[in-house]
Image (cartoon, rainbow, N blue to C red):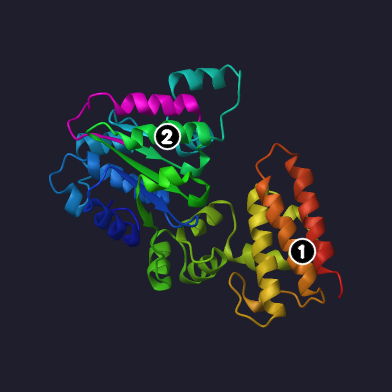
Amino acid sequence: MTDSAPWIQKQTLALLSQKGHAWLLQGPSGLGQYELATAMVSAWLCESDTALTQGVCGHCGSCHALGVHTHADLFVLMPETVLLAMGWPLSEKAQSEIDNKTRKPSKEIRIDAMRDAIEFSQRTNARGKGKAVLVFPAERMNHVTANALLKTLEEPPGDVKFVLATEAAHQLLPTIRSRCLSHTMAWPSTPEAVTWLQSQGLSSDDAHALLKAAGGRPDEVLKQRNLGQTMPWWSKFPKAMLMGDASYCSDLPPSEVIDALQKLCHDLLMLKTQASLRYFNEADLPKLKVSSAQLTAWFKRLSQAAKTSEHPFNAGLMLEALCTEAREVMNSAT
């Protein structure tokens, strides 16, 4: 926990002081739900006597096993695509099926994985500190997997704790939410977030600009940076879209392009109504003659596109279509 952001550390210690067997961490993306869930699990399983009040020791056998993703008393329940992206191992059966190309990694939490988690929760713990199940993103459970988990949440084995982390709590079954202690993620202050981002290698100017572009969410800043969305890239994005330049964002997945376009559309609407901008500096936005009604209609189409951005469409064609639409809307006159 010593390496986590200060607002994550504060929330971790506050939640560890509570008694219960299941927690639900909720809030918008980019606020550190996964990091908080991991910090809680690490403290529950750490062999230090002060882990629950002062944080994990970082050097015991349990902390080492967690660091290399091999702890016998932790079950990580995620979509296979997320497990692979984060370096967590798949089950032997799932790995074999994917290696043999009998199927692709799942983007949902599979019922087979849920059954494995339930069986795990009923075993005797290996290291004497109880067991933990981490579910992320919890909204990726379908109704079948969620109902399977519900039965275990209602009658949990004695030494297992659950932490569910989500960026879309409204998509969870009400019965799942009601069985958990709910925690809404805290937003860090701008100075606190900027200081932490500087410790992650960003300059002060980049940290301020990208934090604004990310809507105040520090984890989103690091994600954008890793995708190449630096401060110069972000400031030139509006004019690139005015020209319909698809090559400008050709390295980004469609979901990230749609997110950037939604932020651009939002601030163009704010500019029309002389309201405060949220994501861009005013100097970076071109002066347009497009109407508020056209921008609103564009935003609705982008929101619809976001719902299907992970479908197996041709990404190049989708990118061309998105940027062409941006050019047409931004160049239209009232």
In primary-sequence order, the first of circles 2 and 1 is 2
Q: Is residue 122 magenta?
A: yes
Query: At x 26% / y 31%, what residue is drawn?
Result: 157
Secondary element type, mark 2: strand
In magenta, the rendered stretch is 110-132
Q: Residue at x 76, y 62 (%)?
A: 298
> Where does the image place residue 9, in percent across and percent down from the top left?
29, 57
Residue 5 appears in the picture as rendered: yes
Q: Is residue 325 above or below residue 82?
A: below
Image coordinates of residue 146 in percent, x first then y, are: 46, 36
User: Is disc 2 surrounded by few (<14), some (14 to 19) or many (20+) residues within 10 Å?
Assistant: many
Q: Position of residue 77 (x, y in %)?
A: 42, 34
Q: Callout 1: helix, strand or loop?
A: helix
Would you say residue 332 sits in the magenta stretch? no
Residue 202's x, y, as percent? 46, 63
Position of 170 with respect to 245 (left or right) is left
- Name which residue type carries label 1: Ala
Viewer-proximal residue among 155 and 157: 155
Q: Are marks 2 and 1 in contact (CB under 8 Å)?
A: no
What residue is rendered at 50% in x and 22% in y?
Answer: 94
With 130 as the anchor, is 103 left or right in this view? Answer: right
Residue tagged 2: 77
- Report, in whole angstroms, how far the alpha carbon at label 2 lies from the one at label 1: 38 Å
Q: Quadrant of residue 133?
A: top left
- The residue lying furthest to the left in this view is 49
Residue 137 makes an appearance in the image: no
Q: Which residue is mark 1?
A: 297
